[in-house]
Amino acid sequence: MPTPPTPPQPDEAQQTRRLLAWMGSGLLAGGMPVHEVEEDVREAAAALGHDGIEVAASPTGLWVTLASGEPATFEAVDGGVRLDQLAEVTAVHAALTAGTLPAAEALQRLSVLRQRPHRYPAYGVPLGSFLVAVGIALVLAPAWSSIVFAAVISQVVAGLVLLGGRTLFVGPLLPFLAAFTSSAAAFALAERGLVDAPLWTLVPPIAVLLPGSLIVTGLTELSAGAMMAGTGRLAYGGTQMLLAALGVGAAVAVLGVPLSSLDGARPEGLGWWVALVGLVLIAVGITLLESVPPSLVPALLVTVLATFVAQSIGNLAGEGPWVGAFVGACAASLTATLIEFVRPQVPRVVAFLPSFWLLVPGSLGLVSVAQIESSPTAGVLAAVEVLVIVASIALGVLVGAGLAHPLRSMTTRLSPTRRAFVRQLARRPARGPRRPGPPTS
């Protein structure tokens, strides 16, 4: 019986393309803008001795070639990654850039990225959803009835999220089903006088599903010249927002809710302290949802707190909420970079992304779109205001990133703590089973 031929082994160039493609697709799966992903891939390639690399990223995939005219590698982005997985990708990038991690070891670490188990498999999603919903309720709708509502309905939404990951029917309709469930409960309780401001009360349980960060990232990409990626994210985010708004409208139609209940008045606050409690709950909830190590909770809390303080000062000092949104986004970007400088084990993007939930562009957008059903004029004006706020957040992200760029360069080259950290990465074994395959498969 003839011996089957031995499959050809990939050459060094092919392995390098695969490594860069896996790293870039992992960053894209974490929600990073395409222009930042391309920059990070070029940095890693230069450290590996390939200065003529050409890379093109989109929200759904990445093309890499080591030089013009040479073979290219494409890696698709198949779903998102958790923050702990994103932290692993950025750690590999840092070690590659510093020259302390061999390419073969980096490739092995990325190959098992998707197999990394959730740090809190039994209670992470339900308890994390509970804490985030209650925390956002304390910030957006600080009334006891709204807080209790968020605590209860968040568990229903968490169940829908888990079900959506297992069935093809629920997954695409998740924003609609979650918004319909939360809206029906809020309006039904409001009719009995048990809930105030139902339009704001229904938002916290579903805030984690609203595409606020997606829309802001799309605007950021458009501003940076990534036209295809920015347009695609805006179209997708707009579709998700439309599905959520249709869920609210369906609940209004089924229950026969009077249009007067669709006003944009927020419930009266409980005091200044509730927002601070909400920030702590949001940080801890994100940790549980995204499988973040407990040691990183202080870093997330510092970023969220700095964003909230800057946003509040901007709202007090400015002529409108767009000033607070702009200042808050700048503070989030700068604070995340400072945290990375002090604690290199906390990647900038991991510390920065949770601040989007605090800036709540998705929550404001859903409330504004829902108001169109009761008063088209008031709804359109509110929607325009939200567009200005979202654009201000995108501008703040760009300005903050520009101001932080010199600090990022100094962090990479001069920080002794970062050099010690990347040396430690080079000695750390990869986690998970040794299974071949890209991190986004």
Image (tube, grey):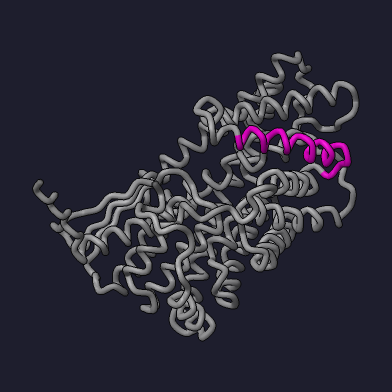
Residue at image position (66%, 68%) is 295
Q: Please name whichever residue, 123 or 78, is drawn nearer the observer in this view of the structure.
A: 123
Residue at x 29% of width, y 58% of height: 18
Q: Residue at x 14, y 49 (%)?
A: 4
- Above or below: residue 272 compared with residue 144: below
Q: Which residues are magenta?
A: 142-162
Whether residue 156 is in magenta: the answer is yes
Task: Say whether residue 20 is left or right of residue 317.
Answer: left
Residue 39 placement: quadrant = bottom left
Observer-nearest of 116 and 149: 116
Answer left or right for 223 relative to 350: left
Q: Which picture quadrant has residue 368?
A: top right
Q: State left or right for residue 190 relative to residue 318.
A: right
Note whether residue 323 is visible.
Answer: no
- 389 above or below 237? below
The image shows residue 248 at horizontal and vertical percentages of 67, 25
What's the magenta bit mostly, secondary-structure-wise? helix
Please identify the residue farthest to the front as the structure is shown: 1
Q: Is residue 260 left or right of residue 170?
A: right
Name the residue: 76% across, 29% down.
Answer: 263
Q: Quadrant of residue 348?
A: bottom right
Q: Position of residue 191 (x, y in %)?
A: 86, 21
Instruction: Give how far across and how far down residue 299 sits, in percent.
Output: 65, 67
Residue 406, position as x, y percentages in the image? 47, 75
